[in-house]
Image (cartoon, helix red, strand yellow):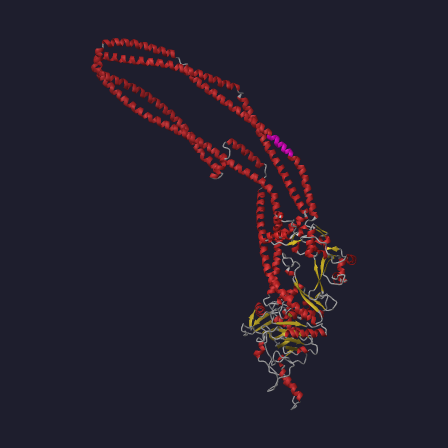
């Protein structure tokens, strides 16, 4: 058997198959539209032709659907649903969308290797209505291609107008040009996916609806963007909390490392001091040697100058000596010559005159020498007397001082003891430092852990920390209010969540968080309108901080929804425990605020018995939502089932005034949960007790070390004082000894000067004087007698002798001076050589000492200032060096501590910056989310709440039922500070098929298959005018309906699908093409009599035509007409009903 879709090629696409036939020639039948008029009826993107070959049950078939409602009818198994499969796959869809298979090769006819689908789409039109090119899409499926593991991937080849393309190009043409979405169940509902539609939850239904409402899927895309934005913001919130915890942990670690770092810094400081002191020591050695070299250089220069001066002064003397020698020789020769000529005449006179002159000079000199001896003797004796007194005083003072050896022994003993005590003191000081550090560290640990314990026990602080870590702006507003409480008339309370002091258990905390809006929990409570205005102005207006404020100016008794008698019955019969506000402890005004905002005094807390009553005894509709006078009210009860809790809400529909219920699972508490694990508190307390016990053991040892430290410090000070006293004594004795020695040396010199024997000298002078006087008298007598001869004889020789006498004396003096200068030069030369040798040695040592000093680095001006501040003597530097070496020896070198501390501080800085960046990024994302959400919400409200709900309610009422389409928002939508819970948004279809039953959400649990089918098709009908897809397909949606509902549903489908074009001048401005696939239709469906309805009949059996193109409607009707009129020639007209054609090869 070969199934085929029977149709007439010559019949108009929109005409019914069973119309009266047109007159074969020259008849008066209805006028058919031209091909151009027929083409203009198709909405761009709708299907004009479908060709299938070797596709499931179809060996080869081609059919042309009409532009409006197409009813595909045929017995079960003939291939009706195959047409939808072909449309889906031919337009780029994949097998999983059909719910049948996951491999395209399974759609190839049995025992065939190839299959193809060819679909011709109505062309798109430009702004002037002119049609564009007709696009024909073809999918060729090859059984031999593709892999088993790839599920047929690669087995299909796509063509657009005979050009090979990839699947992406097909999807792009289909989705972007024609706005077709074969993956959207609102526009394409195959038989195997009908149950999936009614099985959608509210979220899935909303997404499928969004996809169908715009060609670009902008509502769906915006929804996904909002979900992703919200997810990113929540992730960033979690990241902020994680980074905050990380920052706190890093700060605690850094605090623990800080003490060790201080010890290492102390060691580093000591090492730096040692380096400076060693450098200072090297420079001091260099400076001492350089000063010594400069001193020697000065001495050398002075010696050299003295030597040079001596040598220079010797040269004139030698010159003078030579000149005098020549002069003496000349005078001697001249005198000898004169004496030879005038010897006799002038000898007596000359001798007499010479002797007379000499004697007179001698007398004068002797008298002068005699006077000088007396005067010098008196002066020297006076100096001796004075010096003796000084010597006696110095010796007396020295005698009063102790023995030098005793003092030196005292000094040595004191210095050794001081050194011993210093070494012991350094050791004890290190022990004390370690003991003090250990005690300090333990106290620091105890303080940190006690603070941590106090913080853990402070439930309010824990809760506020959790809130403020997520809500930085809330923390800012809280800080401002805390600092400015005095500005308000009465205290500002809040945020509310921080003021809840106690709840019965963690379940109640979860109930409260789920029921009370997030904005309310984060609100502040003021007690007057004036405080409200002040707080809003200062925080919201001036500082741009978001803040929620509630005014509670009075406390009222809660108005319960149930009487005491009814409440007792609920507790007894249904396991109700209490109202929600009775399970909470908080200040009165906080309770009043939550009652005003969230009606917590009307919410019941139930048990597992309550949940059973909800399921089995219709507790919500029959009890909770009905007052005692029979009127309706909203109801809310929280129940428990195992480990899960549920909130059941009953509300009154504003359209039908019917009760509809909603059930939400309650997640665990986040903000009100207990922040601390009791085991963690106990463990922390054990740690504190252990630290305290350790402290009790270490503090006595620390005090013992302190006592040792103080004792050694006092002992060291005593020995140091004794050493300094001995040193002072030693210095005083040395000074006294030096003074005695100097005084004695000076006294000896003075005594030598004063003790010279002047009597012999005087006697010699007197004797010489007497001799000279006697000689003078004799010479005067001789001179008197020889005066005349002398005058004559001496007249010529007087000048010569006088010159000879002076010259000889000068020669003598010069010779003595030369000898003295030569001796002086020799001594100066020796001194110069010694000083020069010492200077050269010092100069030679200087570069080595300087290099030793420069090993520590170049000496900058800043470095010079640092070194100048250090001690200026080697002894002092050595003493400080010893202390510094003791310090570093008592501190273990652990560079890892500094590296770890620096690493922690770097990580803290990076983490703080990361935390700030995350908060800023979170704010930016929140602004983007708000900007995207506003138009999206407005569009949904307009489309779903107003338009779709109105149509759906109308269509359901026509069936004698009730229906409502409700937009379900996220749980925290009412909170202005919430993100919106966009992933939780959805659409609920609420229906009621019986008068007494309430509106219920459409589900397989509550409704039959027929009820679900009716609700689904009515929902799709309500969406039809809003959809942008040019065609829609529904497969066997009418199955399971009773006759009445099926007729009404069919009527609604025809009415909605065949409405006139919205623009009379544009034939294709209608709702689009519609495919309704069904195995049967009820008889007498008068709505079928519509020219916009096309019926496609599918037949299967042994008497089908060999090929689909053999069927011709016009010839069939003409033949029937002739048979009805009777045969004129008795011929068989059966052959006239069909036409032959050659087999088509593809």
Q: Is residue 343 visible?
A: no
Between 430 and 512, the one lying in front of the other is: 512
Magenta highlight on residue 707: yes
- For this rendering, which residue is in front, 568 or 203? 568
Q: Is residue 816 left or right of residue 912?
A: left
Q: Quadrant location of the C terminus?
A: bottom right
> Looking at the image, which residue sits at the far bottom?
1129
Spot occupied by residue 542 in the image (x, y as percentages of width and height): 58, 52
Up the image or down, 1129 lies above or below 469; here it is below
Residue 733 image offset from top left, x and y in percent? 51, 22
* Highlighted magenta segment, given as a residue range: 703-713
With 526 as the anchor, is 840 left or right in this view? left
- Quadrant of the image occupied by residue 1038: bottom right
Please determine whether, in this image, residue 860 is positioned above or below residue 60: above
Main secondary structure type of the part rendered in magenta: helix
- Can see residue 696? yes
Measured as percent of width and height from the top left, residue 336 is found at: 23, 17
Image quadrant where residue 1098 sits: bottom right
Can you tell which quarter of the image residue 983 is in? bottom right
Does residue 494 lie above or below 1092 as drawn? above
């Amino acid at each position: 058997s070969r199934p085929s879709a029977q149709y007439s090629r010559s019949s108009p696409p929109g005409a019914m198959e069973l119309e009266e036939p047109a007159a074969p020639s020259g008849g008066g039948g209805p006028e058919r539209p031209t091909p151009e008029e027929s083409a203009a009826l198709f909405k761009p993107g709708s299907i004009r032709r479908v060709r299938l070959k070797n596709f499931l049950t179809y060996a080869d078939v081609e059919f042309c659907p009409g532009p409006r409602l197409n009813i595909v009818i045929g017995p079960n198994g003939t291939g009706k649903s195959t047409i939808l499969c072909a449309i889906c796959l031919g337009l780029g869809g994949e097998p999983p969308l059909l719910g049948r298979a996951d491999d395209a090769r399974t759609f190839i006819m049995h025992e065939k290797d190839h299959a193809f689908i060819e679909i011709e789409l109505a062309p798109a039109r430009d702004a002037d209505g002119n049609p564009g090119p007709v696009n024909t899409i073809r999918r060729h499926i090859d059984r031999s291609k593709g892999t088993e593991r790839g599920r047929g991937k690669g087995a299909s080849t796509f063509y657009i107008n005979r050009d090979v393309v990839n699947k992406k190009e097909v999807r792009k043409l289909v989705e972007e040009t024609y706005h077709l979405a074969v993956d959207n169940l609102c526009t394409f509902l195959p038989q195997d996916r009908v149950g999936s539609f009614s099985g959608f939850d509210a979220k899935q239904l909303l997404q499928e609806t969004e996809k169908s409402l715009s060609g670009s899927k902008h509502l769906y895309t915006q929804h996904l963007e909002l979900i992703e934005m919200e997810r990113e913001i929540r992730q960033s919130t979690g990241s902020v909390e994680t980074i905050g915890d990380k920052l706190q942990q890093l700060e605690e670690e850094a605090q623990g490392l800080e003490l060790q770092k201080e010890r290492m810094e102390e060691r580093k400081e000591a090492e730096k001091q040692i380096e400076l002191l060693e450098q200072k020591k090297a420079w001091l050695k260099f400076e001492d040697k350089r000063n010594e070299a400069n001193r020697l250089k000065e001495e050398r220069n002075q010696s050299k100058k003295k030597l040079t001066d001596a040598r220079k002064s010797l040269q004139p003397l030698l010159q003078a000596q030579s000149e005098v020698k020549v002069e003496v020789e000349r005078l001697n020769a001249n005198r000898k010559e004169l004496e030879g000529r005038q010897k006799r005449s002038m000898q007596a006179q000359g001798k007499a005159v010479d002797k007379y002159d000499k004697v007179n000079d001698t007398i004068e000199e002797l008298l002068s020498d005699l006077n000088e001896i007396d005067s010098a003797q008196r002066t020297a004796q006076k100096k001796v007397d004075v010096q003796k007194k000084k010597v006696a005083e110095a010796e007396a003072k020295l005698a009063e001082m102790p023995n030098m050896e005793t003092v030196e022994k005292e000094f040595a003993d004191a210095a050794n003891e001081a050194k011993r005590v210093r070494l012991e003191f350094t050791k004890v000081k290190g022990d004390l430092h370690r003991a003090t550090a250990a005690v300090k560290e333990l106290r620091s640990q105890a303080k940190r852990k006690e603070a941590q314990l106090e913080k853990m026990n402070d439930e309010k602080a824990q809760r506020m920390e959790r809130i403020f870590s997520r809500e930085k702006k809330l923390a800012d507003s809280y800080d401002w209010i805390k600092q400015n409480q005095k500005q308000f008339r009465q205290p500002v309370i809040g945020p509310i969540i921080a003021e809840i002091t106690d709840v019965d258990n963690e379940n109640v905390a979860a109930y409260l968080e789920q029921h009370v809006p997030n904005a309310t929990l984060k609100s502040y409570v003021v007690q007057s309108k004036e405080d409200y205005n002040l707080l809003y102005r200062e925080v919201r207006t001036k500082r741009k901080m978001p803040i929620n404020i509630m005014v509670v100016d009075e406390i009222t008794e809660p108005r319960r929804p149930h009487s005491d008698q009814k409440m007792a019955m609920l507790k007894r019969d249904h396991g109700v425990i209490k109202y929600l506000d009775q399970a909470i402890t908080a200040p009165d005004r906080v309770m009043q605020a939550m009652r005003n905002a969230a009606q917590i005094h009307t919410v019941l807390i139930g048990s597992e018995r309550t949940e059973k009553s909800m399921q089995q005894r219709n507790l919500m509709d029959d009890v909770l939502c009905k007052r005692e006078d029979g009127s309706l009210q909203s109801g809310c009860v929280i129940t428990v089932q195992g480990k899960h809790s549920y909130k059941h809400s009953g509300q009154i529909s504003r359209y039908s005034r019917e009760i509809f219920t909603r059930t939400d699972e309650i997640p665990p508490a986040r903000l009100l949960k207990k922040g601390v694990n009791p085991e963690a508190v106990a463990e922390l307390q054990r740690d504190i007790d252990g630290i305290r016990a350790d402290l009790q053991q270490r503090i006595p040892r620390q005090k013992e070390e302190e006592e040792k430290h103080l004792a050694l410090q006092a002992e060291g000070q005593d020995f140091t004082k004794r050493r300094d006293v001995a040193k002072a004594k030693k210095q005083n004795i040395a000074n006294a000894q030096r003074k005695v020695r100097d005084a004695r040396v000076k006294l000896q010199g003075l005594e030598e000067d004063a003790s010279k024997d002047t009597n012999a000298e005087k006697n010699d002078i007197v004797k010489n004087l007497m001799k000279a006087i006697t000689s003078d008298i004799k010479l005067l007598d001789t001179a008197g007698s020889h005066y005349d001869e002398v005058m004559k004889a001496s007249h010529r020789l007087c000048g010569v002798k006088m010159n000879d006498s002076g010259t000889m004396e000068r020669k003598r003096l010069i010779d003595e001076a030369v000898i003295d200068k030569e001796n002086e030069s020799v001594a100066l030369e020796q001194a110069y050589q010694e000083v020069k040798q010492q200077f050269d040695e010092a100069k030679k040592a200087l570069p080595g000492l300087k290099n030793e000093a420069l090993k520590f680095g170049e000496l900058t001006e800043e470095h010079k200032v640092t070194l100048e501040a250090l001690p200026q003597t080697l002894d002092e530097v050595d003493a400080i060096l010893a202390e510094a070496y003791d310090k570093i020896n008592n501190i273990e070198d652990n560079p890892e501590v500094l590296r770890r501390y620096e690493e922690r501080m770097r990580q803290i800085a990076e983490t703080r910056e990361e935390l700030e960046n995350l908060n800023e990024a979170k704010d930016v994302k929140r602004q983007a989310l708000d900007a995207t959400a506003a138009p999206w919400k407005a569009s949904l409200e307009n489309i779903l709440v107003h338009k779709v709900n109105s149509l759906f309610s109308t269509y359901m009422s026509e069936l004698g039922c009730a229906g409502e389409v409700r937009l379900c928002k996220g749980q925290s939508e009412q909170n202005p500070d919430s993100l919106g819970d966009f992933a939780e948004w959805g659409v609920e279809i609420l229906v009621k098929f019986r008068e007494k039953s309430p509106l219920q959400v459409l589900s397989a649990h509550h409704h039959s298959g027929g009820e679900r089918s009716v609700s689904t098709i009515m929902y799709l009908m309500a969406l039809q005018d809003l959809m942008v897809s040019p065609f829609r397909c529904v497969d066997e949606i009418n199955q399971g309906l009773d006759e009445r509902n099926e007729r009404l549903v069919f009527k609604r489908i025809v009415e909605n699908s065949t409405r006139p074009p919205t623009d009379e001048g544009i034939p294709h401005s209608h709702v689009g093409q519609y495919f309704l696939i069904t195995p049967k239709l009820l008889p007498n469906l008068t709505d079928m009599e519509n020219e916009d309805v096309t019926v496609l009949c599918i037949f299967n059996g042994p008497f089908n035509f060999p090929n689909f193109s053999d069927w011709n409607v016009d010839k069939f009707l003409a033949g029937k007409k002739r048979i009805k009129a009777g045969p004129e020639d008795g011929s068989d007209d059966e052959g006239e009903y069909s036409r032959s054609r050659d087999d088509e090869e593809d």
